[in-house]
Image (cartoon, grey):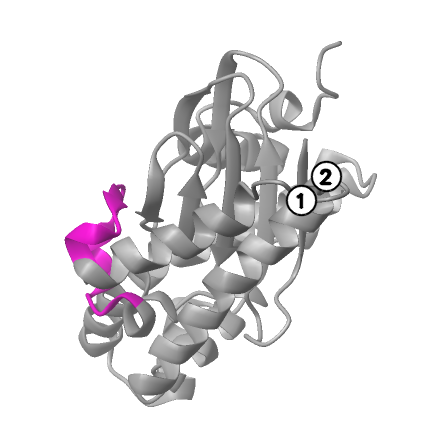
Amino acid sequence: MYRERAAVRLGGAVRWASVSAGDGPVRVLPDGCLDLLWSSRAGLLVAGPDRTAQVGRSVPGERWIGLRLPPGVGPAVFGVPAEELRDRRVPLTDLWGRAADDLAERVEAAAEPVGATPPLTVTDWSAVAASVLEEVARARLRAAGGPDPLGARVAARLAAGATVAATAAEVGLGARALHRRSRLLFGYGPKTLARILRMRRALDLARGGAPLAEVAALTGYADQAHLTRDVRELAGVPPTRLLAPPEG
């Protein structure tokens, strides 16, 4: 079970929750974002920006609550450059110390209520726990003076299909300066972010029913073969595998 919804008080962020139904591999595609996570097994974690898909293994009954921050916002919330978290899953205590322990107690109380009458549904406990994560992230973002506005501008232009050169010109930076700022904000340079965002855009179109050849043309790939190669490099499997309905 996986569900997500827009955050209530943190613009552009997404709350999500999942409960593992069985033991098996879980593939998480890169998206240019940092996530604040709580797992019933592992506690509070920060998921850094991935360059390629992360493949883990689900544990039956494990519950996850997540707050996915918009591209470029994570560094202001977590207090470290995104590149320090690239391709990593880091215990929140490594970044926030005692404050992370206090937050863990609040999230666990919300996600694992004792004596609730009637018993809370998945929708209920996930919404309460996610609201705690959102409240804390919002407060830390406010204390940091807000996110670097460059992050939203760069991510929006690249997500819309603009070239890196055009994006750099629009935000008034040279190529090297944009690369340096992008590593701090997103964890990698603008070319990598553009590839990831283009893949996400292509997969969204394909899930909506568009044929892959049409998707490739609409999203700037040379042809369907180019799309397939790029998705395989970033996701570890071809798009047909990602688009196939789940077994069972």
How far from the left and from the top, in percent, is residue 72? 38, 70
**Depth check, front residue: 129 or 200:** 129
CA gap, disc 2 and disc 1 = 5 Å
Q: Which residues are magenta?
A: 78-95
- The residue to which callout 1 is attached is 116
- The residue to which callout 2 is attached is 119
Mark 2 and mark 1 residues within 8 Å of each other at the beta carbon: yes
Residue 94 lies, with reference to residue 52, above or below; the image says below
**Residue 79 occupies which quadrant of the picture?**
bottom left
Magenta stretch encompasses residue 92: yes
Magenta stretch encompasses residue 35: no
Left or right: where does residue 60 sit relative to residue 193? Answer: right
The residue located at (59%, 49%) in the rendering is: 16
The residue located at (64%, 71%) in the rendering is: 8
How far from the left and from the top, in percent, is residue 84? 17, 55
Left or right: where does residue 62 sit relative to residue 209? Answer: left
How far from the left and from the top, in percent, is residue 83? 21, 57
**Depth check, front residue: 45 or 115:** 115
Q: What element does badge 1 sit on?
A: loop
**Depth check, front residue: 96 or 228:** 96
The residue located at (34%, 33%) in the rendering is: 42
Q: Is residue 187 visible?
A: no
Q: Is residue 224 visible?
A: yes
Q: What element does badge 2 sit on?
A: loop
Name the residue type under label 1: Ala
Residue 37 lies, with reference to residue 146, above or below; the image says above
